[in-house]
Each structure stands twice: as C-alpha cells, then as structure tokens.
C-alpha cells in the first residue's frame, strides 16, 4: 500500500496535528508502508527525507505558527503520477490539504 499525505503542518512544527502525523508516519515506517508527505517548508531547520515534498511557505499573519504554503499543482501531479498512491489522506483543509482533495477527486 502507498499513502500520499497532504498536510499544512508537519514535523518540526509543534502542534497536535503535526505531532500526531509524525507518530503516524513513524508507525508507517515501522510497518514498512510506503508514504509521501506534501507539506510546507518550515522556518526551522529540517531534516532531509525522500518521504517529504516541501513547498515554499510564509507565516500566516492570523496564526503565525501556521505556514501558508504555495503548492505547485504541476509538481504535485507529477509526484502523484510517479508515486501512484492507493490512498490520499488529507488531515488539514488549507492550501496543501485542498490540493490533496482536488487530486483525490480526479
């Protein structure tokens, strides 16, 4: 099974969604389930992983801890076609999450 996860917050962000998704992806790794995460770039230093596709982002003025990402739909489509996920999971309904919903419907 292959899972594509579209989230507007992920590790190293510190919030409930990011921490839960980190635990979930740790579990997927332990179970040897293939996944790819689509998430915004964070302001803090990040580790490099082949499982994560990051997008340029800015701090959201109403909620500075949250990042407003600028997903490139052409890159997402290309990544999804090469990855060919069985399942698309969208835990957050913001810019990247809405992109995931769009591609899940198509």
Image (cartoon, rainbow, N blue to C red):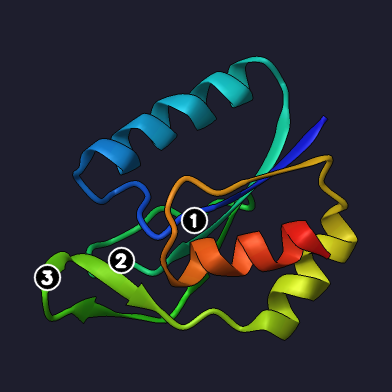
Residue occupied by mark 1: 48
**Residue 79 image offset from top left, x and y in percent:** 77, 66
Closer to the chain start, of discs 3 and 2, is 2
Residue 50 in percent (x, y) is at 64, 53
Residue 62 higher or lower than 51, as above or below: below
Position of the C terminus, as image quadrant, is bottom right
Residue positioned most to the top: 31
Q: Name which residue lies at 41% across and 34% down.
A: 22
Real-space Cα distance between discs 2 and 1? 12 Å
Quick one: 49 or 104, which is closer to the camera? 104
Residue in the foreground of this view, choosing between 27 and 71 = 71
Q: Residue at x 68, y 68 (%)?
A: 102
| Residue of label 2 | 42
Residue 7 is situated, as x and y percent measured from the top left of the image, at: 47, 54
Q: Earlier in the sequence, mark 2 or mark 1?
A: 2
Q: Which circle marks residue 64 in the picture?
A: 3
| Distance (Cα) linking label 3 and label 1 | 24 Å
Label 2 vs label 1, nearer the camera: 2
């Amino acid at each position: 099974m292959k899972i594509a996860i579209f989230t507007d917050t992920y590790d190293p962000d510190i919030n409930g969604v990011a921490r839960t998704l980190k635990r979930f992806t740790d579990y997927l790794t332990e179970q040897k389930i293939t996944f790819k995460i689509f998430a915004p770039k964070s302001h803090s230093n990040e580790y490099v992983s082949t499982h994560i596709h990051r997008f340029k982002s800015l701090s959201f003025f109403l909620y500075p801890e949250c990042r407003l990402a600028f997903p490139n739909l052409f890159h997402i489509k290309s990544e999804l076609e090469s990855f060919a996920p069985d399942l698309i999971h969208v835990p957050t309904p913001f810019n990247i999450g809405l992109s995931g919903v769009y591609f899940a419907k198509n």
